[in-house]
Amino acid sequence: MITTGFAPAHIDIESKAMETLASHGKTFYWASFFLSVKQARAAAKLYACCRALDDIADSTTHSNATKHQSLQDLKLKLENHDLPCDHALAQALRSLTTEHQLPKAAIISLIEGLIADTERVAIDNKRALDRYCYRVAGTVGLMMCGILGVTDRHALPFAIDLGIAMQLTNISRDVLEDAELGRRYIPLDVTPVEIRFASDPIRTRIQQTVADQLLRAEAFYESGLRGLAYLPRSSRIAIFVAAHLYRAIGRKLQNNGCAWWEGRTVISPTEKLRLILGLIPKLIYVVLQPSPKKDWQHASHLHASLEGLPYVDPPS
């Protein structure tokens, strides 16, 4: 049994999944209304599992060594399905993998990314940032492909890109919040303390770095949205909505001059509704767009830093 101290074995993650999504993943909760009931439940369950994993890595009441060991134990249970397991989180992840043919390599990579969060987080360069984004978010794109019934493996690099785009948005939005946790994800040689109490020169340097990451996110969004053509038509609306709502966070931050020190940028329900209504013509085109008759060329330069990771461009 995994004795993490974070999630008692008897907790039913699945029964709380939609509640977790509604409370903590409002953008994805909006998008879930455009999925079938079965897909929405599976997506909510995946989100709840990812949230539970995040909570382990982010815990402020446990030591880094304890958090590290807890995630390592979960990783071991998922790598070896023959091992007995009565821990709710491991069971939920196992059942998702089995029911929706989720790539085990993606779940393992996700946990490896979160294990890194239990250590000193100070990302030094774009390559390290891209690989981190792949592990904690590109992998979620891969797993969502299974839930949405994607059968063409050529879709996978595009799914990775959409996950990376969203994570770059997250990192740009949460610079101050992450610094308060002692973490620095933006590739800039400043300490979390310097971020929290930034002088004007450091504030400006961070501002430019945030602007650079949001610009890079745009390229990943463009690629990820292009890959929607690989999805079954019934699934395209939800991912289109989720991507554009998340993208709107980054664009709002850009329009605000990348003022990261003002705290987390959010999109209000009114802004979300207005955005969705304005995107209806484009959405109709995306839904009606035929699946690619030939394999679309993925922008391979987007994966230049991801060599050796599962399912990166191009799939074999």
Image: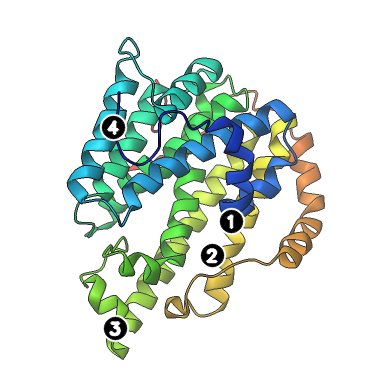
- 39 to 227, vertically: above or below: above
Label at residue 246: 1
User: Is residue 139 shown left or right of residue 199?
Assistant: right
Whichever of labels 4 and 1 marks the residue nearer the N terminus, that label is: 4
Check disc 4 and report the residue beneath it. Answer: 3
Which tag is nearer the camera, tag 3 or tag 1?
3
Disc 2 + disc 1, Cβ < 8 Å:
yes
Amino acid at circle 2: Gly
State which quadrant residue 14 falls in. top right
User: Residue at 21% across / 43% down in the picture?
Assistant: 66
**Residues packed near mark 2 inside 10 Å, few (<14), some (14 to 19) or many (20 plus):** many
- Determine the secondary structure under disc 4: loop
- Residue 11 spot, x, y in % from top left: 49, 32
**Residues packed near mark 3 inside 10 Å, few (<14), some (14 to 19) or many (20 plus):** few
State which quadrant residue 183 falls in. bottom left
- Report whether residue 65 is seen: yes
- Residue 104 spot, x, y in % from top left: 39, 22
Amino acid at circle 4: Thr
